[in-house]
Image: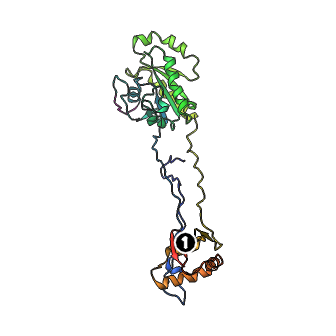
Amino acid sequence: MGEVLDDGQRLLVAQGGGGGLGNAAFATAIQRTPYVAERGSKGQEGTYRLELRLLADVGIIGKPNAGKSTLLSAASAARPKVGAYPFTTTEPQLGVVSVGWRTFIMTEIPGLLEGAHLGIGLGHEFLRHATRTQVLVHLVDGSVEDVAGALRDVNEELKAYGGGLDQKPQIIVVNKDDLPEVASRREDIAKDLSEVEWPVYFISAAAQTGIEPVLAKAAEVLLAVEKPKPLPVAALEAQPEGSQGQPVVLVEDGVYVVLNDQAVRLVAGSDLGRWAGRAQVKVHLDKLGVTQAAEAAGIQPGDTVRFGDIELEW
C-alpha cells in the first residue's frame, strides 16, 4: 500500500528482475561465435488496485440536501449542480477559495446517509475522497427538527468508515439561516450544539451571508494542521530465487531439477536449437558444477532434467 501525492513522485510496487548477459559476454578468443546467453531474472508479479483520490484542503460534508453545492458555489468559482432534492451531486466537486492572500482547494463530498460506511447511498464511492482533506466543514440543514442529531449521524459514519476521518478538525456550519423558522431557533440550536468541541457558525449559502467568517476560519485552521503524509509503503517481499552459488540438483518424480539460478537463466537464454549452442551450454554447466551435481544425484543419459520451465533430455 502506498500513495502518490506530488507531481513526479514514484511508488515502487513490484521489484523488477535483474538483467542477464548477452552473447557477447560469453565470447572468447577460442569461441568467437557464442550461442549462449543469460536471460534476466523474473521480476515480481501481483494484482494491484489503483484508486484515485481527490487532493483538497477542505471538504464539505453533511447529509443530502444540506446545501453543500450552494456553499461551494458561493465560496468559489465552482458551479456544481444545485437542486432542491437529495443527491443532486453525484460526484465530488472542486473549487479554489481565496481568503485574503491565501488560497485553498475546497471539495464537496456528496451527501452521507446512515450506513454510508457500508456503501449505502453513495457510501465508499466518495467517503474515500474526504480522507485526504485536512479540515472538514460540516454543513447542517438548520430547518431539520434535530440539528444536533443530524450532526451526530454524519460523525458516526465518519468514525465507522475509519481512515482518520473522525479525527480531522471540523467547522460546524448551520445553513439556511435566512429562513424564519431557522432564525427564530438560532439560540435553541446553538444551545443544542454547545457541547460540540468545534466552532459553530450560522450562514445562508443561498443568500451568501455569514460565509466569509467560515472561510477565514478554515484558512486559519489549515495553517495550524499538519500537511498530509503519504501512507507508508508496504515492504516488498524478497523475490524467491534458486541457489546462487551451489549447483543444487533435486529429484522430483524421476525428473532431475536444477536449482542453480545462473544455470537456469543460461539455459533459458541460449540457442539450444543448434548443436553448437547445446555443446557450449554443456561447457558452462561443467564450469558451474551442475554436471557433477547431476551425476552425483544419479542422472543417466536419456533422463529428463528441468531448468526452470524448460525440460531437456540429458
The colour scheme is rainbow
The magenta stretch spans residue 79: yes
Residue 220 lies, with reference to residue 259, above or below; the image says: above
Counting from the top left corner in percent of width and height, residue 299 is at 60, 78
Q: Quadrant location of residue 26? A: bottom right
| Residue at x 60% of width, y 52% of height | 235
Q: Quadrant location of residue 239? A: bottom right
Counting from the top left corner in percent of width and height, residue 177 is at 43, 16
* Dot 1: element: strand
Q: Which residues are magenta?
A: 76-81
Counting from the top left corner in percent of width and height, residue 61 is at 47, 28
Q: Residues within 10 Å of mark 1 (few under 14, many from 20)?
A: many
The C terminus, quarter of image: bottom right
Q: Which residue is mark 1?
A: 307
Residue 220 seen from this side? no
Indicate left or right for 7 with 259 as reference.
left
Residue 293 lies, with reference to residue 188, above or below; the image says: below
Q: Amino acid at mark 1?
A: Phe
| Residue at x 40% of width, y 10% of height | 180
Residue 50 lies, with reference to residue 224, above or below; the image says: below
Residue placed furthest toward the top = 184
Residue 56 lies, with reference to residue 4, above or below; the image says: above
Residue placed furthest toward the front = 253
The magenta stretch spans residue 134: no
